[in-house]
Amino acid sequence: QSLCVIGLGYIGLPTAAFIASKGIAVTGMDTNQSYVDRINAGEVPFFEPDFEETLSRVVSEGSLKASSEVPHADAYIVAVPTPFNDNHELDPTYIESAAESITPHLTGGELIVLESTSPPGTTKKMAEHLIEMRPDLTLEDGKPNSVYFAHCPERVLPGRIMVEMEANDRVIGGLTPRGTELARALYATFCTGELLLTDATTAEMAKLTENSFRDVNIAFANELSVICDKLGIDVWELIELANHHPRVNILQPGPGVGGHCIAVDPWFIVSAAPEESKLIQAARNVNDSKPEHVIDKVLAKAARIKNPTIAALGIAFKPDIDDLRESPSLEIVRELATILEDGDIRVVEPHIKELPPKLKDLDSLQLQDLETAIADADIVLVLVDHKPFKQFDRAKLGDKVIIDTRGLWR
Ligand code: SAJ
């Protein structure tokens, strides 16, 4: 049995490595040649705890090979980005080009699984796009020229991929019963969690629902934090107290919601049902407006200091990873650097070696180590609860102004 995984990002690469570790010959395809080269050298091109050992083993054993070409395979997993456009609708470019790259290799009997988070109906559209290019194939079950499709959304939490890739339950929805069954058999090779079978559209919606649930609940915490700022109440203490109730479990407020999932996926529900998704939209707006609230707080403090130096702790979108995608912390730092007329900002981000392109052009910014940045700062702005920040000796903070969006040092 052979498998090709298209898209070797945070999800595609670990998926390819897990399946390869079960003895299946896997080709990982990515259009980024430098990714391909690094992976073939056994190197993980992003930070994910404990993953490098598994990757280098499957690469050196020869069960996983990265390539910039799509080969023929019995099964394909598509794990490409699914960004949205200005109207919050899916930009299908990556999915379509994945389908186009698979199409010439199909002979009938293959399975194609879409893992990328997608609006309801996307797996079906992808299948129809492929059949338009190959009218000699059919989406009907059980013919010699059948191709089978399924959606199996990824659910792993970045930073815990090595645990969750294997242990999480998976929702698997085929376009047809045979598609569901083939996908179930594929995921059974490496998943120890329960495999939950449904149709493709319900599987697509299940994934969006999970992330919207989290977004709505974080929005509740973020709204509470803004209310508490107004009322002079410590939101962390408040939540801790409320969570002692046996049926209350409030999440943590922060500087906003980032990453390429929680801040994106709810919009796919909104664009599918704009009139009916009022709460989901309100939650998105609450979370999207949180960075502005943080910026206002910093500016109010900075206005009282001549040439203020601000230590901004963290620009990743969440703790203990190097992922800067859709990061509210990064946006806050960028906005502050643009608005502040005097003063400068020292960015502390233990997981990167240089400032990302979005921040590089700003003169008032520099990357610095934690100790120096805090020693020099008038204002310490905590944006991410990375481990080294948690462990920092608070006695060294002296009488600096602290703006702690994560409740790290309360
Ligand atoms: N956040 C808060 N407060 C919280 C929890 C999170 O402000 O109490 C913020 C984080 O700082 C971050 C954002 O929310 O900016 C998202 O972080 P996250 O840890 O909630 O989630 P992701 O984006 O890393 O991963 C989510 C997960 N989904 C759910 O937990 C329902 C993961 O299981 C999915 O696989 C992933 O989205 C995905 O790829 O869709």
Image (cartoon, rainbow, N blue to C red):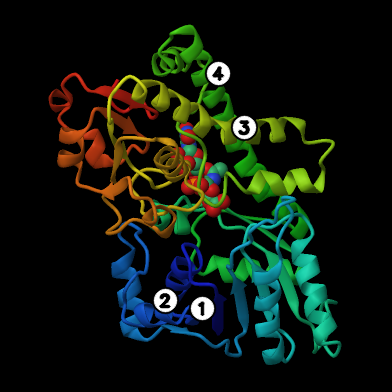
Between disc 2 and disc 3, whose residue precedes?
2
Callout 1 touching callout 4 (CB < 8 Å): no
Indicate which label's residue lies in the foreground, 2 or 3.
2
On screen, residue 104 above or below 352: below
Front residue of this view, candidates 60 and 256? 256
Residue pointed to by mark 3: 216
State the CA–CA distance, disc 2 to disc 3.
35 Å
Residue pointed to by mark 1: 30
Q: Is residue 322 left or right of residue 154?
A: left
Front residue of this view, candidates 124 and 282? 282
Give the amino acid at mark 2.
Answer: Tyr
Q: Specify whether tag 1 is near ligand 1 (CB below 8 Å).
A: no
Mark 2 secondary-structure assignment: helix
Residue 247: mark in rendering: 4
Give the amino acid at mark 3.
Answer: Val
Query: Which of the 4 image quarters holds residue 110?
Result: bottom right
State the CA–CA distance, disc 4 to disc 2.
46 Å
Give the amino acid at mark 4.
Answer: Arg
State the CA–CA distance, disc 4 to disc 3.
17 Å
Query: Which of the 4 image quarters holds residue 39?
Result: bottom left
Residue pointed to by mark 2: 35
Image spot of residue 49 (x, y percent): 32, 56
